[in-house]
Image: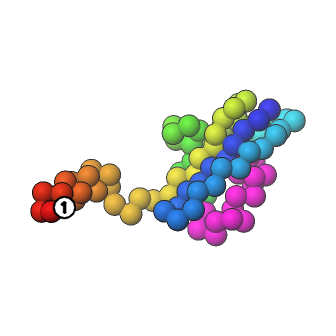
Amino acid sequence: MDIEVAFATPDKQLCIPIKLKEVICVQEAIDLSGIKDQFSEIDLSKMKVGIFGKVCDLDKIVSQGDRVEIYRSLLCQPMDARRNRALNNQNN
């Protein structure tokens, strides 16, 4: 079974492919990927995880082709960012 584990910061994005011979959960996939070694800020006790953009629990079983994603806190809400860009474009 082939899956991926992904995480991104504003400066660095990483998607690690994993080949599995057994059924595992999201937590095990993250651990096996070694992605926490690449990003010291990953704290699964505080961060949400998901598969293809849909939040799930750490004990969810992964399926063939899944992309396990670790979600970080946003620096600002997307609507606020769009509003600020629109205001900046009007002033320029």
11 vs 27, left or right, is left
Is residue 38 covered in magenta?
yes
Q: Residues within 10 Å of mark 1 (few under 14, many from 20)?
A: few
Horizontal side, residue 36 vs residue 75: left or right: right
Residue located 61% across and 63% down the image: 42
- Circle 1 sits on which residue? 88
Magenta region, residue range: 26-42
The C terminus, quarter of image: bottom left
Which secondary structure dominates the residues rendered in magenta? helix
Quadrant for the N terminus, please: top right
Q: Residue at x 82, y 40 (%)?
A: 19
Q: What number of labels is visible?
A: 1
Q: Position of residue 31 (x, y in %)?
A: 75, 54
As displayed, is residue 52 above or below residue 86?
A: above
For the view shown, which residue lies furthest in the front direction? 92
Q: Does residue 49 sit above or below 38 in this rendering? A: above
**Residue 82: image location, x then y, percent:** 26, 52
Give residue 15's position: percent from left, percent from top. 65, 50
Secondary structure beneath disc 1? helix
Residue 6 in sight in this render = yes
Residue drawn 64% across the image and 40% down it: 67
Residue at screen point 58% across, 57% down: 13
Residue closest to the far left: 91
Say if residue 56 shows up in the picture. no
The verdict on residue 89 being magenta is no
Q: Which amino acid, mark 1?
A: Asn
Question: Residue 41: x, y in percent?
Answer: 59, 68
Q: Quadrant of residue 40?
A: bottom right
